[in-house]
Amino acid sequence: MATPNTTPDGSSADGTYVDDAELRTIDGVQYRIDSRSSTFGGFVSVTWTADGRLFDVRGHTAEETILAVALSLQAATPEAAAAAADEATARIQLHPISAEAEFDDGLRVTARGFDEMQGVFALCVESPTPECLHSGGEDPNPESLLEVFTVDGHRVLIGWGLGATNLTVSDGSPLTEVASSDGMDTFVRVDLADGQPIPMLEWTEGDAQRGSAPSVRIRP
């Protein structure tokens, strides 16, 4: 997970890694291998860059299995990547809406889950152009999600939180906050500038200070 003032792969703005994940070079490509234990069992993430794109393969299984999958992948053409994104969006939109809201400019967002009450696993921008992103996090029933969407050619950070208050962005960027239609959830939006590193979202939940970083994913 990213830390403030770093990119989502855990590196600083100049590309220097700031965490203790293993760096392994295979066939001239540097892979970042992050293996850790969690409440839900072992979790492994393998990230690398190729052709100017950032890739991430993760899962709750053996490190060797995740690395083997990563080494077997080939970069898709922009057309194939766009088609895969459209297919993923269509599949996610088959699931019920757990929370929804609309920003003042008409940008409509939803959080979707396995049922209407729990198990939120994806965020969607429903308009102007539908796009859904599946969260690849460790928690099967998260209380927050954070993803980066492309809206009218610009990057927009969308966050969802259940019972969150005092929301801020780690780099001090201005954010827009709106309650869900039922008033139970909060959605936030940060319009990212060109070249701006993706920040974390921080908030207060009860007496605890918490934070969330977006998933790392293949982007065309």
Image (cartoon, rainbow, N blue to C red):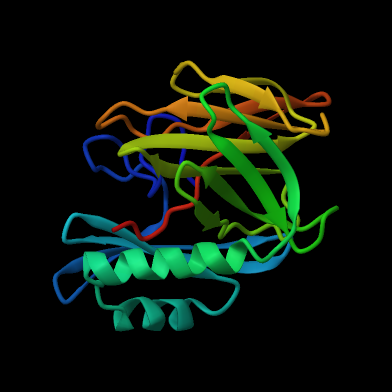
User: Residue drawn 48% across and 76% down?
Assistant: 63
Q: Position of residue 206 (x, y in %)?
A: 83, 26
Question: In the figure, residue 81 lies in which quadrant?
Answer: bottom left
Is residue 39 found left or right of 21 in the rendered image? right
Q: Position of residue 27 (x, y in %)?
A: 16, 77
Question: In the figure, residue 198 lies in which quadrant?
Answer: top left
User: Residue drawn 76% across and 64% down?
Assistant: 114
Residue 64 against residue 11 in the figure, above or below: below
Q: Quarter of the image containing the C terminus? A: bottom left
Q: How many labels sit on residues?
A: 0
32 vs 162, nearest the viewer: 162
Residue 14 against residue 177 in the figure, above or below: below
Question: In the figure, residue 95 lies in which quadrant?
Answer: bottom right
Q: Position of residue 196 (x, y in %)?
A: 31, 29
Q: Is residue 15 visible?
A: yes
Is residue 34 found left or right of 122 in the rendered image? left
User: Residue drawn 58% across and 26% down?
Assistant: 103
Q: Is residue 57 visible?
A: no
Residue 1 against residue 103 in the figure, above or below: below
162 vs 132, nearest the viewer: 132
Q: Position of residue 68 (x, y in %)?
A: 38, 83
